[in-house]
Amino acid sequence: INAEYGKQWYQRRVRARSTELARYGIKTGLTNYPASYAVGLLLARRLNQKYGLDETYTGVEAVDGEEYYVEKEGERGAFYCVLDTGLSKTSSGARIFGVLKGAVDGGLDIPHSSKRFPGYNGESGEYDAAAHRARILGSHISTYMQTLLDEDEDAYKRQFATYKKEGIMPDMIEEHVHKGTRRYQSRSIALGQEREDRGYKPKSYKRARMSLQQRKKSRPTEGCFPRSPLILLFTSDFFIFNII
């Protein structure tokens, strides 16, 4: 996650990954909305600590889902950021806005509104902070886990195998997430020092390079038409395509 612009286009100052959440107690569900919020919170604490702002801008004391905007305290203002969503989906309730909410609650100054947060009603224009808090703490995951456990236990074991391995039941999700977020907010944990995950390799969608012989072997031979010269006949009114 890039957090600050530099002189040469932009430079990455700090980074936070969901794979780091296991250090603070969240070892499962690293791609859901609660994990997105936790990544934003971790990023904010790390960035503020790097620039000596962690004592001044501590963010919210507890997850409540309420609208929160950082106000200047003392001589130094809060670290100002602009959210760059890139190619991420920006539909209402998307995980990228969970990262945004976590970063704001962690003490970063990011211009935003609540219109894309879970709990916002587009018809009435009202924002339900309690609904957003429930989303952050994974109440939707807990409900789905309980439903699946009641209806199809085999499917539950397949889909939530890591939760079962960690001994996390549906009624323990909220406390599990809440405990992790409290650890990020604790100043006793050194978050300013960035450590690389050993053995971590980002997902790559590039095809492996092939030699000439490999490309020739991979080229389909059966069921293909032989190559033929293409003749284009131009007339005054239309084009005529003819394959010999």
Image: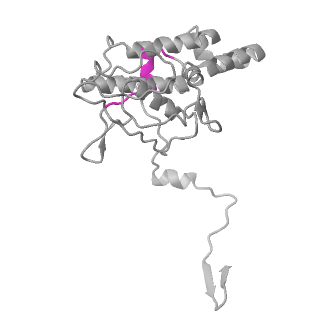
Query: Residue 108 colored magenta?
Result: no
- Identify whether 147 is placed above or below 241: above
- Identify whether 27 is placed above or below 211: above
Q: Who is closer to the viewer here, 45 or 107?
A: 107
Q: Who is closer to the viewer here, 103 or 17?
A: 103
Residue at the (42%, 42%) spot, across then down: 84
Query: Is residue 42 toward the left or the right of residue 88 in the image?
Result: left
Residue at the (58%, 37%) spot, across then down: 92
Can see residue 77? yes
Query: Is residue 142 toward the left or the right of residue 19 in the image?
Result: right
Residue at the extreme top of the image, as rendered: 167
Query: Is residue 109 toward the left or the right of residue 147 in the image?
Result: left
Horizontal and vertical percent position of residue 198? 37, 23
Query: Is residue 114 toward the left or the right of residue 152 in the image?
Result: left
Horizontal and vertical percent position of residue 129? 55, 24
Residue at the (36%, 12%) spot, across then down: 186
Horizontal and vertical percent position of residue 126? 59, 32
Residue at the (28%, 25%) spot, across then down: 73
Quadrant for residue 19, please give it.
Answer: top left
Q: Which residues are magenta?
A: 14-27
